[in-house]
Image (spheres, grey):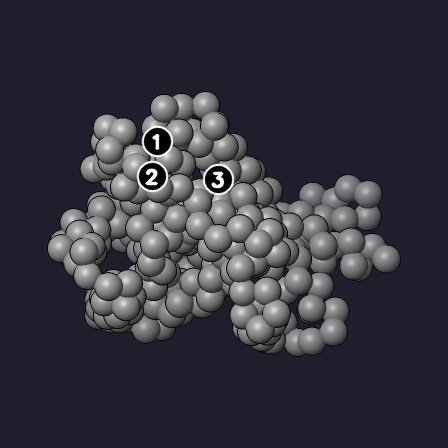
Amino acid sequence: MSYYAQLLLNGIVAGSVYALFAVGLTLVYGVFRFINFAHGELIACGAYFVLFFMAAPLSLPLAGAVLPALVLTVFVGLAQDRYVYKPLRHQSHITLLIASIGLSFFLRNAIQLVWGSDLQTYGIGLTRGVSFFGLSLTWIQMVMGGTALFFLSFLYILLTRTLLGKSLRAVSDNMALADIMGIDMKRVGRAVWLIASAFAGTGGILMAVDTNLEPMMGLTNLIKAFAALLLGGAGNVWGALIGGLIIGVAENLGVAFFSPGYKDFVSFSIIILMLLFRPRGIFSIAGGVR
């Protein structure tokens, strides 16, 4: 029994990071109504920018490299919108989708050109776990869960307690009406890209601390974020959060029956089943940040 409880606990930790990816992806969809396939490369950028600041000549410690890495990741996210998506905003959704796929390939190859295609790590090494009630967590897992909880709590307060959050929800519900009501659309757009980039970059750093870095890590985690988005309903922030947790738990419980190498099989299976039987998500809410 403790074996399955341990898998469940591991799944909740992993799922909380997937939720960070999914929330950023669904925020962009909720406001701009397109799936940003280059969101996966924001995940990879966060992880690789930390590696850049930790390497010579800067040689910053991990904790000191996180903030400048997130600033650069947010800059990449804002540049995506400013130089690629904004000029195409009045084109069809297919045009934006194709542009995001092209941008994803461009950024992934740029990462591979600079850092190579080999696996890399931050060199932290193995850490002793903390045991309680027959379960154990490493300090890295505790940092992952704690950081995800902090960011998601921040998002809850932002969306429900601030004027910016209410503006963001109004734009996601009806962009034309929000514009007529005088909401600053440019400010809301910048806020969406800032939050989505920061969440993606933070999740990428947490994943890299727990495992390793490689140029395809963005695509791999984008699939999980997409599965979580479909589970929760596209555009639904809280649905994406729950979806991320479900994906993490399903993947880790699947380890009891399959090899860990088949984790992605679980995500793909959930995507296919959701598209077949409940394409609007388990909460059946289409559109809106909520």
Q: Nearer the viewer, residue 260 or 228?
A: 228
Tell me how many marks there are.
3
Q: Secondary structure at mark 2?
A: helix
> How far from the left and from the top, in percent, is residue 126?
57, 55
Q: Secondary structure at mark 3?
A: loop
Q: Is residue 73 above or below residue 97?
A: above
Q: Is residue 259 left or right of residue 89?
A: right
Q: Is residue 205 visible?
A: no
> How far from the left and from the top, in percent, is residue 18?
51, 54
Q: Residue at x 32, y 73 (%)?
A: 117
Q: Nearer the viewer, residue 124 or 193?
A: 193
Give the amino acid at mark 1.
Ser
* Cα–Cα span, label 2 and label 3: 11 Å
Q: Residue at x 78, y 59 (%)?
A: 4
Q: Is residue 35 visible?
A: yes
Q: Residue at x 44, y 50 (%)?
A: 287
Can you tell which quarter of the image residue 92 is in? bottom left
Q: Nearer the viewer, residue 125 or 25?
A: 25
Q: How packed is label 1: few (under 14 Cα within 10 Å), some, or many (20 or more)? A: some
Q: How packed is label 3: few (under 14 Cα within 10 Å), some, or many (20 or more)? A: some
Residue designated by label 2: 171
Q: Which mark is residue 167?
A: 1
Residue designated by label 3: 290
**Quadrant of the snapshot with the N terminus:** bottom right
* Cα–Cα span, label 3 and label 1: 11 Å
Q: Secondary structure at mark 1?
A: helix
Q: Residue at x 22, y 46 (%)?
A: 78
Give the amino acid at mark 2.
Val
> How far from the left and from the top, in percent, is residue 108?
28, 67
- The numbered mark, 2 or 3, whose residue comes first in the sequence reads 2
Q: Is residue 276 left or right of residue 159?
A: right
